[in-house]
Amino acid sequence: MNTPKYRTVKVNDLNVFYRESGPAGAPVILLLHGFPTSSHMYRNLIPMLAKEFHVIAPDLIGFGFSDAPHHTQFRYSFDNLTSYVQGLIDLLGLNKFAIQVFDYGAPVGFRLAMANSEKITAIISQNGNAYEEGLSDGWNPIQKYWADPSEENRNNLRAMTTAAMTQWQYFTGVSDKTLVAPESYMLDQLLLDRADNIELQLDLFKDYASNVALYPAFHQYFKKYQPPFLAVWGDKDPFFLPPGAEAFKKDLPKAIVKFYDTGHFALETHVREIGEGIRIFLKSLS
């Protein structure tokens, strides 16, 4: 049995929390969470993968149990979030690893892949987008803020950080809502409701434009390095549409794309199927 460990380390000037499980000498997989959640979203997947892999799941700065400095004292950008995960990779001495990305974890993970191309053994994307055809109309209010970063447009996005919206993200597209553990969205909201956290989230909404600007660079990375790639996608995700999953095949012809009858947080309802698919995919590479 691989008992998970809950660790906090200093990366540069901030504390980074991460979950770790699995045999020390096993192939490494790095799990990167999204908004508005944390490594807690992987709580059920980690024990499935830890039987055969060394699993590391950090909380991004501003999320979960990692430090969340005040938004006036720290620039909340995806470049900055990536730099702290890179610091953790360097601190832990990870020389070869797969990445699993979700939502915000995708632009962080794809930045890491470009910077560590010789270290990446595989990429798994669970509703982690890299193509404009994957962006739904749900992005319209955020895209409006990109075009006009006014106080009015910023304030209009506060609705996306409410308890009702967090629960909506978990339930939309889910046929059996009794499968969604209430502690998932409740913990997310408790952490969102911390002092200043909503402000830093609004900063990240604005900076998400930098990810879309990097899509061509991500595509070039995919084309050049052809990392083994698995997309596992809740096909009723209100934010990232199925065409975004299929689009990976344009640059990665050998990519495997699998859809599941669920929403954005697919692991809440389909962790067994997705976990087994990831395990089989990674084992096929060894």
Image (spheres, rainbow, N blue to C red):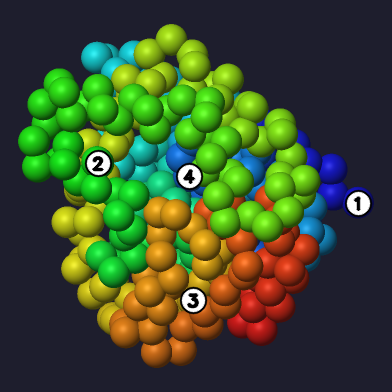
Q: Quadrant of the C terminus?
A: bottom right
**Of marks 1 and 4, which one's residue comes earlier in the chain?**
1
**Residue occupying image coordinates x 21% and y 26%:** 154
Tell me the number on the disc at residue 229: 3
| 222 with respect to 53 (left or right) | left
CA distance separating discs 1 and 2: 44 Å
Please report the residue visible at 61 percent of the width from the left and 61 percent of the height from the top.
262
- Counting every numbered tag in the picture gives 4
Q: From the image, tell me which residue sits under label 4.
A: 34
From this viewpoint, which residue is outermost toward the right? 1
> Which badge, 1 or 3, is on the more N-terminal residue?
1
Which residue corresponds to the image point at 34% horizontal and 25% vertical from the top-left? Answer: 158
Distance CA(mark 3)–CA(mark 2): 29 Å
Q: Secondary structure at mark 4?
A: loop
Residue at mark 2 to residue at mark 4: CA–CA distance: 16 Å
Identify residue type, mark 3.
Answer: Phe
* Residue underneath mark 1: 1
Q: Nearer the viewer, mark 4 or mark 3?
A: 4
The residue at which mark 2 appears reads as 142
